[in-house]
Image: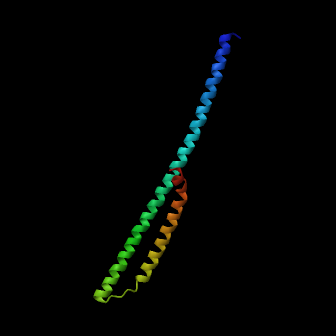
Amino acid sequence: MSELNKYAEEVKKIVTNQVNKAAKLLAENNRDITEVLRKERKKLEIRSQIGQHQRQVAKAYERIGQAYYEHEEQGKSMDYIKDVMDLLRSNLKVINLLNEQLKQLEPEDTSAK
């Protein structure tokens, strides 16, 4: 084997090694990016659910206020308030649970800052 062939083989080994390292690094970074995107998507979904339940809570408070006003002004019965209160309690519990899920996804974010 000539010196040129030996040199070409050595260069080929070095280049192959570097390409393999680069491919491995790219694959690791791709997995990291995919994981970050997955977590961010999950956080967005949870925040969306929280927003939906907060709107339901606001509507429940509005119904309670309206019922109270009508009761005071017109003497209307407030019998259905128990159902509204149950709805309010359940939505507030769900919001708390969703906030806990969100906190579980965020500790890594705060430690990186």
Give the number of callouts: 0
- Tell me if residue 102 comes above or below residue 19 in the rendering: below
Indicate the colouring scheme: rainbow
Q: Hey, which residue is sitting farthest bottom in the picture?
A: 75
Q: Hey, which residue is sitting farthest left in the picture?
A: 73
Q: Nearer the viewer, residue 79 or 71?
A: 71
Is residue 37 rendered to the left or right of residue 28?
Answer: left
The quadrant in which the N terminus is found is top right
Specify the quadrant of the image occupied by residue 54: bottom left
Residue drawn at x 47%, y 58% is 45
Residue 105: give x, y in percent of width and height.
54, 57
Q: Hey, which residue is sitting farthest top in the picture?
A: 2
Residue drawn at x 63%, y 24% is 14
Residue 88: give x, y in percent of width and height.
44, 75
Residue 77: give x, y in percent of width and height.
36, 88
Residue 97: give x, y in percent of width and height.
52, 67
Specify the quadrant of the image occupied by residue 32: top right
Residue drawn at x 48%, y 74% is 90
Is residue 35 rendered to the left or right of residue 53?
Answer: right
